[in-house]
Amino acid sequence: MSLSIVILAAGKGSRMKSNKPKVIHDVAGKPMLQHVVDTSKSLNPEQVIVVIGHESEQVIETMQGQNLIFVEQVEQLGTGHAVLQCHDELKPGNDILVLYGDVPLIRLTTLEELIVKGQKDNVVCLLSFDAANPTGYGRIVRDESGNVTAIVEEKDASDDVRKLTESNSGILYIRGSEYGELLSELDADNAQKEYYLTDVVKHAVNKNHNVAAVICGDESEVLGVNNQLQLAEIETIYRRRRAESLMSQGVKIVDPARIDIRAEVIAGQDVVIDVNCVLEGQIELEDGVEIGANCVLKDCKIGRNTKVQPMCIIDQSEIGENNDIGPFARIRPETKTLNKAKIGNFVEVKKSVIGEGSKVNHLTYIGDTEMGTDVNIGAGTITCNYDGAFKHKTIIEDGVFVGSDTQLVAPVRISKNTTIGAGSTITKDTPEGELSFSRAKQVSISGWIRPSKNK
Ligand code: UD1
Ligand code: CA
């Protein structure tokens, strides 16, 4: 059966104390609502409808271009009312799954289980959980045989019902053929004068339809975000989950509480990540890669057995196999290093190729450079790639040796096997295999007396 997903996101979220609507606050660098949308899309629904209300323009702007249907709920008269607003958009007959923009950690597998159970032979299938502290949640009421008979909101509950700990997550499956009828029965005859979506359970039971529940064993999946503290807690849980998933791929994470994974990570075997690393975007770490403490990796691929020492930043770059990077290296976008390259401390590389076996060991800036194999760049070398208006290229061919404290003023070509004397400012192409340097002749002045304060 085709599926329509409805994501409720109209609430104000006033306890966030923010001008931004709650559902677009980030969890691990991505809006909460985006997490829910991404999980939704993995279920291959025919449509995803997002119910918005407060600051709806901001939500639409953040979430645009993803083939979502936005439905405005001008007045928030309850969760049932929110779903009713979708009537004109919902494809008739489609099964419906209701999710929440502020419940970002729900797992795909849990939703799959809910849908499978619903579609089997139930008209309503809800997701419940055993709450550590059920205060505030709707409670699941079951009869003697254990069948769900109702969800009762805390504010409408008797003392006995309040003692129940099985709680409603809010997430719910409704069979398409029955949904119209069940929703048309909703009213606001309750303590909060709201249209409760949860009342579909009561109405389904009255019509002798099968109602079932999937009990979610992991409460963190159904946690909602209402304030900054809960947002931070959700972030911590998410971070831990990502660390666990990497560890299950075989990655050794030195301390799973001290790593920030905001990335899609593909990792090979025997990868080690030391403490306080931040991973963002799309990351690929091949077998045997070691990442030292305090590194920031973003959108990069790191080849087999490469060692990244502490305090490095690697951004939108591809690092070859058996490289030795850092400590304190900054590798900026569009850099590619080939195998056995070495980029040492206080080296910045931007939009450059570092050839096989080439070494840039200390205190150097390499920008817009194409470097061949087995090049050695001395300490303090600078490629002067920018003339104030334009960027120019430096070509450093195979086997070049650049002495320390050299400026290579681009555009310039350092031909094969050139040696450049230390302290040179190179403005012209160098001939193959020769020594080139540019520096004033050293002079010594005999009898010169160093200034001093004592006469
Ligand atoms: C709801 C459930 C309750 C469940 C709890 C889980 C109902 C009646 N109650 O209660 O059983 O235990 O969630 O957190 O459904 N929303 C709209 N439009 C509205 C009202 C709500 O979009 O008119 C959205 C909110 O933005 C929020 C979500 O629906 O994301 C839940 O609304 P909320 O008012 O927090 O429901 P609860 O009273 O907590
Ligand atoms: Ca709530």
Image (cartoon, rainbow, N blue to C red):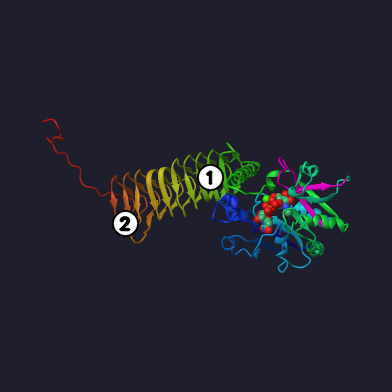
Residue type highlighted by circle 1: Val
Q: Secondary structure at mark 2?
A: loop
Q: Residues within 10 Å of mark 1 (few under 14, many from 20)?
A: some
Q: Nearer the viewer, residue 380 or 441?
A: 380
| Residue at the farthest bottom position | 88
Asked if the residue at label 2 sits under 8 Å from ligand 1, the reply is no
Residue 265 x %, y %:
59, 48
Is the CB atom of the residue marked by disc 1 within 8 angstroms of ligand 1's nearest atom? Answer: no
Region in magenta: 123-143
- Pointer 1 residue: 278
- Determine crowd level at label 2: few under 14, some 14-19, many 20+ residues with C-alpha closer than 10 A: some
Q: From this viewpoint, is residue 369 visible?
A: yes
Mark earlier in primary sequence (2, 1): 1
Q: Which residue is mark 2?
A: 429
Res 252 → quadrant: top right
Quarter occupied by the N terminus:
bottom right
Say how many tags the image has. Answer: 2
**Which is nearer the eye, 198 or 310?**
198
Asked whether residue 100 appears in the rendered view, the answer is no
Left or right of residue 357: residue 408:
left
